[in-house]
């Protein structure tokens, strides 16, 4: 996460992955951080590059998780686009 100007925060790929992968040891921490920022009225920003990295990460086998079904993965960017700047 990077704190920006005018109460905005840029979320990097790792934070989004941790928040979406319940098997991650950082899952609760990342999810809580995003929720706290959102509840505080902070603008949350991501980039197209972050979306690409997020999709790539969730669609390939990892040590902590199996690849997610594509049908589930492609729903997440729509949520991000609606809720992040």
Image (spheres, rainbow, N blue to C red):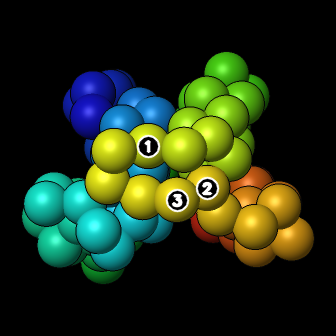
Q: Tell me if residue 85 comes above or below residue 53 in the rendering.
A: below
Q: CA distance from mark 3 to mark 1?
A: 6 Å
Which image quadrant is residue 18 in? bottom left
Q: Is residue 41 above or below residue 6?
A: below
Q: Determine which quarter of the picture holds residue 67.
A: bottom right
Secondary structure under the numbered disc 2 in the rendered image: loop
**Which residue is found at the position 43% from the left and 50% from the top?**
17
Res. 58 in view: yes
Q: Are marks 1 and 2 in contact (CB under 8 Å)?
A: yes
Per the image, the residue denoted by label 1 is 62
Q: Position of residue 77 (x, y in %)?
A: 74, 56
**Where is mark 3, residue-wise?**
66
Task: Count residues near mark 2 (Cα–Cα under 10 Å), then give few for <14, some for 14-19, many for 20+.
Answer: some
The disc placed on residue 67 is: 2
Q: Are marks 3 and 1 in contact (CB under 8 Å)?
A: yes
Give the distance between the C-alpha atoms of the residues marked 1 and 2, in whole angstroms.
Answer: 7 Å
Q: Are marks 2 and 3 in contact (CB under 8 Å)?
A: yes
Q: Secondary structure at mark 1?
A: loop
**Residue drawn 54% across the image and 44% down it:** 61
Crowding around mark 1 (Cα neighbors within 10 Å: few <14, some 14 to 19, many 20+) is: few
């Amino acid at each position: 996460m990077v704190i920006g100007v005018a109460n905005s925060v840029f979320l990097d790929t790792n934070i989004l992955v941790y928040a979406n992968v319940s098997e991650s040891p950082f899952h609760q921490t990342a999810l809580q951080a995003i929720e706290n920022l959102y509840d505080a009225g902070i603008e949350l920003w991501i980039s197209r590059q972050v979306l690409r990295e997020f999709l790539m990460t969730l669609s390939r086998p990892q040590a902590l998780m199996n690849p997610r079904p594509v049908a589930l993965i492609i729903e997440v960017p729509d949520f991000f686009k609606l809720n992040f700047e």
